[in-house]
Amino acid sequence: MRARLAILVLLALGLSAALAGSALAKGHPRIQDRRAASPQRLLPPPRSRLLDRLSQHGKPVSPAPAFRSGFVLQADGYEVGVSTFGSAVFVEVWRGRRGKRVATSYMARGIARPERLQATFGHFGKVKMRFRASRHRTWVGRRRTCRGANRFIKKHGVFRGNLRFRGEHGYVTVRVHRARGAVVVPAPKCLGRRGRGGGSGFFGFFEPRAALLSVAREGIDASTLVVLESRRNTQFVATTEETRGRLAIFRIAVLRKPSRIRTDEALTTAKLSPPAPFHGTGRYRAYADGSNSWSGDLSVDFPGASRFPLTGPSWETFLEVPF
């Protein structure tokens, strides 16, 4: 029982580490437009099957890009980032901070170079911009250590060209011809070196009291819901991945709140009612023949996909509670 619970914990960490909580894209530098109210990071979407789908339409995407290039804007109450990830270009739209965050990433194959961003996102829009570095704004880590921000060289500058993007049903619209951004490359002194990894002591600080995993698949598209309950709070992570022609879309919602997975003593029933951006209630029930059901009106509000259902007969659900 504990082994299966540990597997659920590791899965939840894999889903949320890239976009949620304090593990927001560790090691990836900040690239920010001056008009943004506070610094934000351009975040690569979780690997999972997303990059595999992109590789179906061209050459494989490099898992370890040698540079990051892009910028961040504000539009319609969202942060909108345009950046590179391997040989792909993605537009990410997000809202929220640590403990409560929703985001949608649109990824397409195009031209992803330090000085050039170009890709077409179908009917959502396109980006075609070139970077010109500032002569007086190049940041280099002052310390000789290869840790944190000191591992990178950041060149500030301006992207010029054309960005036109409109999300589903017009929830966000961006039209710009100029944006302040940056290009980030590994510092030569740090090439080939590995920084100290983090997270090895996670289980020393997190003791799950219960965990729920629910997965739904439809063709090559997939949706997941991971819930981890600890003594202090519960972390909810909902994701969905879909492919539209040559475009891949990944959505994620992360919430950390003092909440509980309400179960009976026999662990045959469970009830889940998380707060916003989630809505409704999910009900789990196990039967004597070994089957189970996951029903109710539980849903979540993703950017561009509000009230996305998280229950139904197509969802395969697992509930684990350690003894």
Image: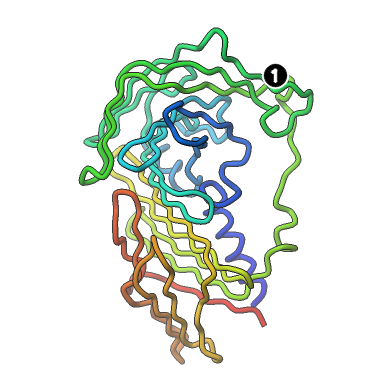
- Which secondary structure lies at badge 1? helix
Label 1 belongs to which residue?
188
What residue occupies the far top of the structure in this picture?
135
Judge whether 205 appears above or below 138 on screen.
Answer: below
Instruction: Say above or below: 270 vs 203.
Output: below
Residue type at numbered disc 1: Pro
Residue at the (52%, 32%) spot, across then down: 62
State how many labels appear.
1
Within 10 Å of disc 1 (Cα), the crowding (few <14, some 14-19, many 20+) is few
Which residue: 64% across, 67% down? Answer: 6
Q: How is the image coloured?
A: rainbow
Q: Residue at x 48, y 55 (%)?
A: 100
In the displayed structure image, the side of residue 219 where residue 287 appears, left or right: right
Depicted 10 relative to depicted 1: above or below: above
Residue 64 percent coordinates (x, y): 58, 33
Residue 88: name its quadrant: top left
> Residue 146, position in %: x, y?
74, 29
Residue 123 falls in which quadrant of the image? top left
Specify whether 164 is left or right of 234.
Answer: left
What residue do we see at 57% from left, 77% from top?
320
Q: Position of residue 113 (x, y in %)?
A: 46, 20
Q: Nearer the viewer, residue 247 or 72?
A: 72
Residue 60 image position (x, y, % from top left): 47, 33
Q: Quadrant of the N terminus?
A: bottom right
In this picture, residue 147 sits left or right of residue 279: right
Quadrant hosting residue 273? bottom left
Residue found at the far right of this picture: 144
Location of the C terminus by quadrant is bottom right
